[in-house]
Image (spheres, helix red, strand yellow):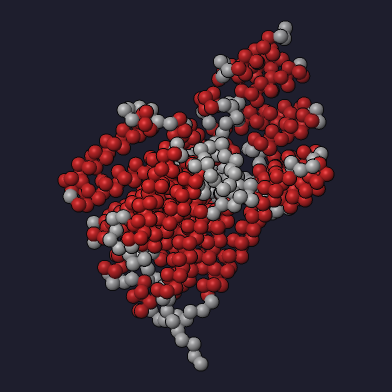
Amino acid sequence: MKKKAVSITQVEQNKFLRNLIFGVVAISLWFNTNFYDPFNSAKLILLCITAAWLLGYLISSFRNIPIMFPKTQFYFIILISLFNIFLLFAAMVTKPVLVGFLGDTQRRNGFLGYLSLSVILLTAFRLINKFNVLVVFKAAIITGFIMSLYGLIQISGNDFVSWNNPHNPMISTLGNPNFASAMLAILTTMSLSGLLLKSLPTVYKFAGSITSIMSLISIINSNSRQGLIALFFAIIFYLSIFSYLSNKKIGLLVICISAVSVILALLGMLQKGPLQSLLYKDSVSVRGYYWRAGIEMFKDFPITGIGVDRYGAFFKEYREVGYPLKYGFEITSSNAHNTFIQFFATAGIFVGLLYILLTVSIFVLGIKSLKFLSSEDKKILLGLLTSWIAFQSQSLISIDNLGISVWGWLLGGAILGIVTNIISLEKESTIGDFSKKRKSVKINIFQPLVSAAFLVPAIFISSQIYMAETNLYKLKGYTAYSESERNQIVNNFAKSLLENPLIDPNYAFQAAVSLYEIGQEDKAYEITKKLNSEDENNLEFLRGIVFFENLNKNTPEVIKARVKMSKIDPWNADNYLQLLILFKDQGSLDKARQMEQKILSFAPNSEISKRAIEILGSVE
């Protein structure tokens, strides 16, 4: 019997749309309390697996419709492809290369994460249209309800997880009050804009109202300005555009008022103007140090950047002297707290420019399309755009957190999808029309095979990350056991960690520390030396070298390591003080005096400078 040939159906598209939405929601909500990093690594695992499965659909969709997709799609496919090609190159020249691909410890913003986010955007672009876009609003309302409810539980002191959390308790499912408040601001924007949609079912409007109220309470109690700032810019944007579309004269007036409000808000965040008491917070103004350090990194490494997600390894080298004097010599940052600067600093000019071009293109296409749409479609697109603006506004002052970013890239894809779908409808050339005009294709196992081909490496990588996270979590926990039990357990888990081909270098160092604690000093030292040789910019590894060489009373090697530290961390007065002491003990008074002068040159009023003067003051 001849098998019936069937074209791609709406049922299939809806199935993959459900996969996409479910994956995005799960990524935002999931954390694993048995992980050493319960948030970022958990989200990276889900993101990679979701993207691998969707990539099979994406490739299949292009195979079935090889040429007949809108020029807009072609433009964005090329743009995102180039972004990932240059990011891949930057990751390949990153040292250690594993960090370039998987991202830094407790950040996970490596090539693999952004490749997966790109798949999320392109899949949303291909799947979402004016007929199914409400599923994005529904998903946002559900996600916001769960996250804000959990935030309220945390605020009340009834969290079911005993987090080791030095921050405000409202961390929701993202691990940080800044991330949680920013995410709730984005989802609140979706919920509020959904209230104005006639096509959104009443039950979701009711849920959206409850979600908005709970989210606002959570944001305010988080003591984080980030969420309020994102929500402020989103509301200003929505009112300005909505007013202009309704009445140009009134709209222009609203835009002028909004512009003044934005300027006053920005001045307030910079501790100037009448709003400074409401908006100023030191954690916002400190971003200036992070931004300027990132810009300096880019100036020195304009083509490839300093390495994908390697900002933390270079921050102390590039930070201004005012930062350690104000916040402490050991305080650091692992991110530029600005996604655009972060890309330029860590991946170079091509990645940075392509990301800006992608962002600007989405914004321009979305704004230009508003004037062509019907009333309901305008409200839908404006809701998507406003929520995307909330995401972009927080990305100007925050770290690119995967749980938030997956929504930003989904919203970007949804904007492009609904705009190109409406354009296609006007030209009577939707994807459905294409399938009617082209020859029918048989539904076979092509898509599952392609998805499986990507799932295999994704699952392998995810399993290695999973094992590394759980093993280190258990390793750190078992160090509190009795000595006889601890030694065997630590040995086993340390071995499992060190044999993992995708182990985070910092996790390997934690294994070395644990081995030292059970008396295996030589093995711990060898691991530390190996890690230091592979990543000479890691100050933790250098401190490990100093520690072990001190144990061996090998003063020349201690000095050598501390001199290297002074190049990576040139404004650390404590390191210069330790060098001063070492040089003095060796009788090298001239070098000791040089260290004293170095300390006095940038930290003359510190306790460390007083200590340096006292030490050398006793020398005749």
Q: Looking at the image, can residue 16 be seen?
A: yes
Most foreground residue, 221 or 579: 221
Q: Quadrant of residue 590?
A: top right
Residue 407 visible in the snapshot: no
In this picture, residue 176 sits left or right of residue 192: right
**Residue drawn 33% across the image and 30% down it:** 275
Q: Residue furthest left?
A: 249
Picture quarter containing residue 586? top right
In the image, is 40 to the left or to the right of 491? left
Question: Which corner quadrant holds the C terminus?
Answer: top right
Residue 56 image position (x, y, % from top left): 51, 68
Farthest right residue in view: 484
* As drawn, 133 above or below 398: below
Rendered location of residue 339, percent (x, y): 46, 44
> Which residue occupies 61% across, 32% down?
568
Residue 224 location, x and y as percent? Answer: 44, 38
Q: Is residue 386 above or below residue 562?
A: below
In percent of the image, x 24 and y 42: which residue is there? 255
